[in-house]
Amino acid sequence: MITKNRKGFTLVELVVVIAILGILAGLAIPRFMDATTNARGSRLVADLRTIESAESMYYAEKGQFTDMKGLVDNGYLAVEPIPPIGAFKVAETNQAGEIEDTVKSYTVTPSNDTTPKTVTINAGTNIDLKTLMTRKNN
């Protein structure tokens, strides 16, 4: 009598495992694709808040706003932040957009001759903290 030594997996078992892995990959990959876009959005909001905070401290001490160079030169910012280039999405508000590679820095525009004194902080056209943190209805 001949006995078979059965070692290993059958073809059916291997196909089932591969199918399960394919289904799991199909569910996971779209989530990872948005991770970079969401990270850019989070960084953008964090940079804008940091600049806004530095402007507030400068205003509290000097009574007026300054530009980006003034924030760095006076020690309110260690370095000038560089905006993340590419598509972004702010997960909390569903705001999305893209920062083009021509944008090399954030724009800080003080208006000290107006009443009240104001400062505008942008990262490209229409990309400011107020716009990014306003919930977009979908």
Image (spheres, rainbow, N blue to C red):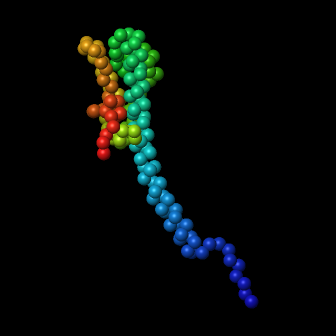
The answer to whether residue 14 is left or right of residue 129 is right
Question: Residue 57: where, in percent of width, then height?
Answer: 42, 16
Q: Quadrant of residue 52?
A: top left
Residue 7 picture quarter: bottom right
Residue at x 42% of width, y 25% of height = 50
Judge whether residue 73 can be spotted in this image.
no
Looking at the image, can residue 136 be seen? yes
Q: Quadrant for the C terminus, please.
A: top left
> What residue is shown at x 27% (from left), y 33% (from top)?
125
Residue at (70% x, 82% y) in the render: 4
Q: Residue at x 34, y 16 (%)?
A: 66
In the rendered image, the residue lying farthest to the left is 114
The picture places residue 5, in percent across and down from the top left corner, at 71, 79
Residue 72 location, x and y as percent? 42, 19
- Quadrant (top left/top right/bottom left/bottom right) for the N terminus: bottom right
- Is the residue 115 above or below the residue 97 in the image? above
Residue 47 placed where, x, y %?
Answer: 41, 29
